[in-house]
Image: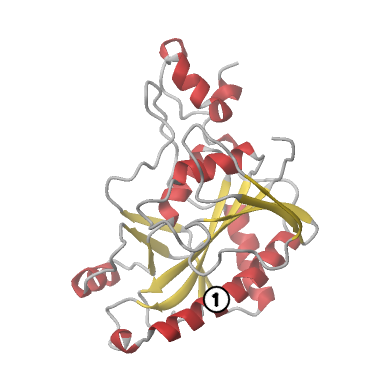
Amino acid sequence: MNEAVKIGIIGGSGLYAMAGLSDTREVRVKTPFGDPSDVIVLGTFQGRRVAFLARHGRGHRFSPSDINYRANICAMKMLGVDRVISVSAVGSLRDDLPPLDFLVPDQFFDRTRGRVSTFFGEGLVAHISFADPVCPQLFEVLHRACKQSGVDAFQGGTYLCMEGPAFSTKAESNLYRSWGMDVIGMTNLTEAKLAREAEICYVTVAMVTDYDCWHPDHDAVTVDQIIATLNKNAENACAVVAHAIARMPTKRTCSCGSALSHANITDRNVVPETTRRKLGILIDKYFV
C-alpha cells in the first residue's frame, strides 16, 4: 500500500462513518482472505492518519456470523495499522451498567460456534498467548479518553461473545449473569483473536444499548428508543475516540507487536509455499 496509517477504527452497530474525519479517501483492499466488510476510509483525525472500517458494512449488510473478520483485520495490517480501536454495541448484564454507559473490557468469553477465528492452518500451526486479550497500553488510553469525554464508563470487565444473530433466551441471559459476565455482544472476541495473531494492539469500547433480556424492563424498550440510544452512543464514541487518538503515544510499549515470536510451532521447512505466501504479511519477519 502506498499510504501507511498506524491507527485503525472499526465501527459497529450505529457507527457506519466517523464524524470529524478530514482529507478522506476510500480504498478497496484485496486480501488473501477475500474482501473486507466495506471500503476502508483513510483520513486525518485529531492530526493523525487513521483507517476507518464499518464492521457490518455501510447500511448494515452483514450479520455477526457473516462478517469476514479475517479480511477486515488483514486489510488493516496491509495498510500498516498496528493499533485498532473497536467500537461495539452491547447489551448489559448488570444493574449498574445502564444504556448509554460504556465499558472498556479487559476479558472476553467465547460462546460462538463454527467461526474461523485464526489466520493459521493449511500446514502452519501457531498458538498465540491470549490470557490477556486486550492491549494494556490501549486499555489505559481508552479509559482515560472516556473520562475526558464525560462518558460514564467502567474500566475492566468481561465481554461475552455469542453467535447470534438471534439474541439470548432469558435462561441464557440469567446463566451469563450468574457467571459474572458484564456485557454481551456478537463480534469483538473474533476480532481480538485475529488482531493478536496479526500483532496488532486491540481494544474494545463497548457501548451499552439496552439491558439484555434478563432485565424486567427489557420487553418495554421500543425500537425508537434503541435507535435513539444507538445514535447518542455513536456521538459519544466519536468523542471518546477523538480524545484517545489525540493523546495516543507514538511508541508501543506493549508486547502485542511480537505475539507470534514464540507462537509458530511448525517446522518452517515443511510449511507449504502457498501457505507461506498467503500469510506472508504476518510471518515473513520470522522466516528470514
Query: Would you place residue 219 above or below residue 39 in this image?
Result: below
Q: Is residue 285 left or right of residue 268?
A: right
> What kind of residue is marked 1?
Asn
Query: Is 271 placed left or right of 110 in the picture?
Result: right
Residue 168: give x, y in percent of width and height: 26, 69
Where disc 1 sits, the SS reads: helix
Estimate the x, y position of residue 82 in percent, counting from the top left.
64, 43
Could you tell me which residue is drawn at 54 percent across and 51 percent down? Answer: 38
From the viewer's perspective, tell me whether residue 8 is left or right of residue 204. Answer: right
Return the residue nearer the eye: 282 or 129.
Answer: 282
Seen at 58% across and 29% down, the residue is 281
Question: Which residue shows up at 29% across the image and 85% down it?
Answer: 219
Residue hosting label 1: 233
> In the rendered view, would you say 77 is above or below 177?
above
For label 1, the crowd category at 10 Å Cα-Cα, with few meaning under 14, some 14 to 19 and many 20 or more, is many
Quarter of the image holding residue 121?
top left
